[in-house]
Every structure is written in structure tokens, then in C-alpha cells.
Image (cartoon, rainbow, N blue to C red):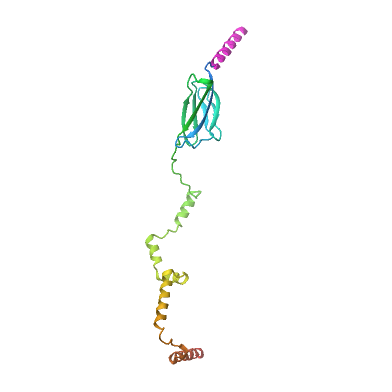
Amino acid sequence: MKYLVVIFFLFATVSTFAQSHDDRPVVQFTGVVHNADSSSVIVPYVSITNTSARNSVSLSNYKGYFSFVAHEQDTLRFTCVGYGPVTVVIPANVPNKSYTMQVSLKPQIINLPTFHVFPWATTDEFKKDFLSIKLADDDLEIARKNINRTTLVALSNVLPRDAQEIQSASAQSMHTSILNSHSLTPNPLLNPLAWGGLIKQITDSDNKSSN
């Protein structure tokens, strides 16, 4: 019985060694990974999976450069986030035991479904906020508020005059100055009617105070 176990173990070891042994020539596989849309743009940190060698994985550096040992006719799969996968097969009878190539990866855009984030933890909080919500004014109501007389008067008191208003006031002042250039400008202090109106205002004010 012991001899049978030893013979079985020997056959299993030989079979495993025969399966792991690969008679294909070894080559140094070297290259650079570029963007397929622009050859001047490199793709860094690309995963290179050798599907012919038990899915062993290599990685390109930050400049897209890679170099590792493989066998002739090995199948290599290049993958990177944001790019479509590319499969490369090393040809047979490679001269000088070295194979160099430039791998191009095509950018891949994946449109994800829309995801809405709501600030309510429960349905009851949503109902409470929904019932107390204050709807915004529509365009017609906003226009009515903007042309309201009270709003226009309030804005005219705080807003500075624009260039057109300043120009109009300056032109009116210049026009008045031209009209009065050949006449005497009346002095309000010498106008008896103005003095009479002032005395009347003072008298009326005294009468109101005494009453």
C-alpha cells in the first residue's frame, strides 16, 4: 500500500512539472501605452494581464512604460480605468528575443444613471417641509413688483443717476445759463413777494404753536 502511494505521488509530481514547463521561447516585451485619440498623451499605470500565464499581472509606470518577460504567442490584456480594454498577442519567431510595440487605448465614456440626493432623513420630514414650503413668484408677479410705483420711488432714492440723467441735467443747466446770459438774474432776497410769503409762513407757524 505504501508503494502505491509513493508511485501515485511520483506520477502527480511529474504531471505537474510537465504542465508547468513551457517550451516556447522567452522574449522581453517592452513598450509604451498611449491614448488612441492623441499619440502625444500617455496613459499611466495600465494593468497588463498575461492570460496565457495564469493571469499574471504587470503594471506600466507613470510614463506609460512597461517591460517584462513573456513567451512567444502569449496573450496580453491591457486595461485601465476610463479606457476600453485592448488584447495583444506576441508573435512567434521574434528576432533578438525582444519585442517592442506601442499600445493605444481608446477612451471609454460610461454614462451613469441620474442619482438624486434628498436632504430629508424620513418621509415625515419631507411632508412637513413640503407643506410649509413657500412657492417662489412667477415671472408675471416679479414683473408686477418691479414696475410697482412704490418700488420705483424707493429705487430712485437710493440708486445713483445714470449717464443719461447726468447728461440731461447738464444740458438743461447749460441751456438756462445761455438764456440768462444777457439778462440780470433775479435775487430772491430782493423779491417782496418772496418776503411776504416767508412772513406769512412764520405767522401761520406761530398761530399753530399758540393754539
Q: Main secondary structure of the magenta part?
A: helix
Query: Looking at the picture, does residue 138 appear above or below residue 168?
Result: above
> What percent of the width, then of the height, locates residue 203?
48, 91
Q: Which residue appears farthest toward the left when viewing the image?
A: 140
> What percent of the width, then of the height, locates residue 64?
53, 33
Image quadrant in which the N terminus is located = top right
Q: Which residue appears farthest toward the right when viewing the image?
A: 2
Query: Looking at the picture, does residue 21 appear above or below residue 189?
Result: above
Q: Residue at x 47, y 51 (%)?
A: 126
What segment carries the magenta color?
1-21
How many marks do you count on the picture? 0
> What percent of the width, then of the height, locates residue 52?
50, 22
Dividing the picture into quadrants, the one containing residue 58 is top right
| 78 sits to left or right of 10 | left
61 or 203: which is nearer to us? 61
Q: Residue at x 38, y 64 (%)?
A: 143
Query: Looking at the picture, does residue 3 appear above or below residue 124?
Result: above
Query: Looking at the picture, does residue 4 appear above or below residue 209?
Result: above
Dividing the picture into quadrants, the one containing residue 68 is top right
30 or 5: which is nearer to us? 30
> Does the segment drawn in magenta span residue 127?
no
> What percent of the width, then of the height, locates residue 102?
49, 30
